[in-house]
Amino acid sequence: MSRFLSQQFRGKEGYKLGERPKAVDFIKLNANESPFPPSPKVMEAVASADLEQMRLYADPHNSAFRQSIAESLGVSVDQVLADGGSDVILGYCLLAYGLDEPGFLFPDITYGFYRVFSLTYGVSFREIPLNDDFTINLEDYRGCGRHILIANPNAPTGLVLSRDQIETILRGNPDSVVIVDEAYVDFGNESCVPLTAKYPNLIVIQTLSKSRSLAGARLGFAVSSPEIIDDLEALRSSFNPDSISTVSQIMGCAAMKDEAYTRACTGKTIALRDSVAEEFARRGFTVTDSHTNFLFVSPPGISAAAYTRALKERRILARYYDGPRVRDYVRVTVGTESQMAELIRQTDEILADYERSLARESCDSALV
Amino acid sequence: MSRFLSQQFRGKEGYKLGERPKAVDFIKLNANESPFPPSPKVMEAVASADLEQMRLYADPHNSAFRQSIAESLGVSVDQVLADGGSDVILGYCLLAYGLDEPGFLFPDITYGFYRVFSLTYGVSFREIPLNDDFTINLEDYRGCGRHILIANPNAPTGLVLSRDQIETILRGNPDSVVIVDEAYVDFGNESCVPLTAKYPNLIVIQTLSKSRSLAGARLGFAVSSPEIIDDLEALRSSFNPDSISTVSQIMGCAAMKDEAYTRACTGKTIALRDSVAEEFARRGFTVTDSHTNFLFVSPPGISAAAYTRALKERRILARYYDGPRVRDYVRVTVGTESQMAELIRQTDEILADYERSLARESCDSALV
């Protein structure tokens, strides 16, 4: 830190990303990336693009990309904002509506970016505890007097609220902005996008990083009322209007147009997720009811931290959060079938090792 | 605007971009883009990239890209921050050092982003008038007690301070951050990057959008002391650590490594700029001493606004700023030789039209 840094940013810690080792000999299940390549149409679109045009600024309005989103979701283009990843859009939302009191309300266990961003940028917020089973208590949000930010499905718990439940929150908070972060919605859930027609205070945020296999392209979008989109456009036009590169805009269009491919990929992930969840449960793990492309599991006997470490020694990366209430759990991305088979095989060995060490310990103490 | 927007952002206007018409039948001289395609090595790098890897998040530390910058400029990698365009980095700098009083000092006539960003995001600043000839009065910056932000060469004037003059500012302000925005430095000027070894309070910002023909890839970087780079990394890691797409990182590396190509392109632009400046001067235009890839010219007789409009009718886009002291000038990018020949040809016609209309008027009034 330099001696010049503004007071507001002193002693703040940035959002901690999942490890991204360079070595290719890890099975990487720690960042909820898609195991599938982007749509072949994405590749074709890039291959046929005239890259000499990279000398020119990209379209700052992301017109073609926004059009492809509007068509895919059945909304009008003035209801759509696009930017370089959904985090950026979430950041603009937090700034746009969270600098004045009373600011935002979000669950205590959710995507860590909300808290880190708010602390860093001086956004006012309050965290509200989830129930003991990680579910959201809708009563907590009724007429709460704050803007609301909910990841649905939630991360890292994987649990989901139905569209009706979100509508209950909307009905109870007509004078607040309600943001629904749908990063994982495509893994078998109801999107709240249709509710934007009825609730001008609703913002739905999605990303192309998960279900559309484009984490490396940095693409996200928001769907809301035209007034709210105007607010957010004003912020992005003063921070970084040229946020999406020409190539990423091309990729984004192609990906949004190939819904069949997206559905094929997410279908495979959903089926595999449910079967791996059963495998974990059979081995005595506590497994939340995940509606995403990851599982949130608590191992039997062995601590979650030790299980994560053991997986890493066996070249499998999972995500561990050392925080209250979640430190008994590990988050693992649903990868390919062979990766999941390897995960279960290694898990069996880790559990067997653990049993052996327990037996040795009790044997040792019997000898003493 | 929605009724929810935070007070700070109400009634603010975003940065106004140059027009970006879709029609290809305009000669586009309004955004200081390069007329040359990116280096052939950039194309090769993209063609040989494994785009299936777009399913994974990009390297959030931009390690390879930062390494290529460090090597190209002869600094260490912990002195380099990279992000999705130099505007983003400028934004982080303004936030990092400008939220506390007394904030920033910058010229009244300079890159408009500084003012718009500061107003939007609550950065404290004061603008100091340039001299009547658009030069900077170094005395204004001596021990000014504020952080300093200077575009060098300046835009839209094109005028430049020598490295010695910047060092005078640095010597006079050891307790302020001094930011030198070198977006146009490659067009024949001395960079202040070597001064970062001596002045830990200096931040030099560059972009790949101009001299390296990659406006569409969104790439910029800062060179400073490791402490300052730490400050800025903390901000970006809480706003958008994944700011540069995988493809743009690949393009950036290739472009930084092909200095010979960059120098060949900038050499052509410099030679053409100087000859077009002479053409304008010969026709009675006032022409500033531009050290960039654009010319800032004031037409004889006809107003700058009318000249810009007439150019547009003739399918040439130039940039006009309707502000005090600059409204007599037009900014035109130095394009290809044939574009410049067309610019001069159309300018001659516009001036001839103007002469004819003057003659008609005086004839009319003689008849009255």
Image (cartoon, coloured by chain):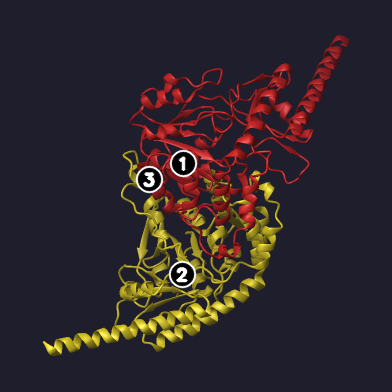
Chain colours: A yellow, B red
Q: What is the x, y in percent for residue B25?
A: 78, 41
Q: Chain of mark 2?
A: A
State the separation of the CA atoms marked 3 and 2: 33 Å
Q: Residue at x 13, y 89 (%)?
A: A367
Check disc 1 and report the residue beneath it: B222
In this rendering, would B180 be left or right of A250? left
Residue A155 image offset from top left, x and y in percent:
44, 69
Q: Are marks 3 and 2 on the same chain?
A: no
Name the residue type under label 3.
Answer: Asp
Q: Chain of mark 3?
A: B
Disc 2 element: loop
Locate residue A219: give its quadrant.
bottom right
**Rendering coords of residue B87 (x, y %):** 52, 42
Bin the neighbour count of mark 1 within 10 Å (Cα to Cα): few under 14, some 14-19, many 20 and up: many
Query: Which residue does the numbered mark 3 point to in the structure image?
Result: B231
Query: Which residue is pictured at 52% across the width and 34% down the height?
Result: B182
Instruction: Classify the position of the C terminus of chain B by image quarter.
Output: top right
Q: Which mark is residue A25?
A: 2
Q: Amino acid at mark 1?
A: Ala
| Place of residue B226 in the rendered image (x, y in percent of width and height, measured from the top left) | 37, 43
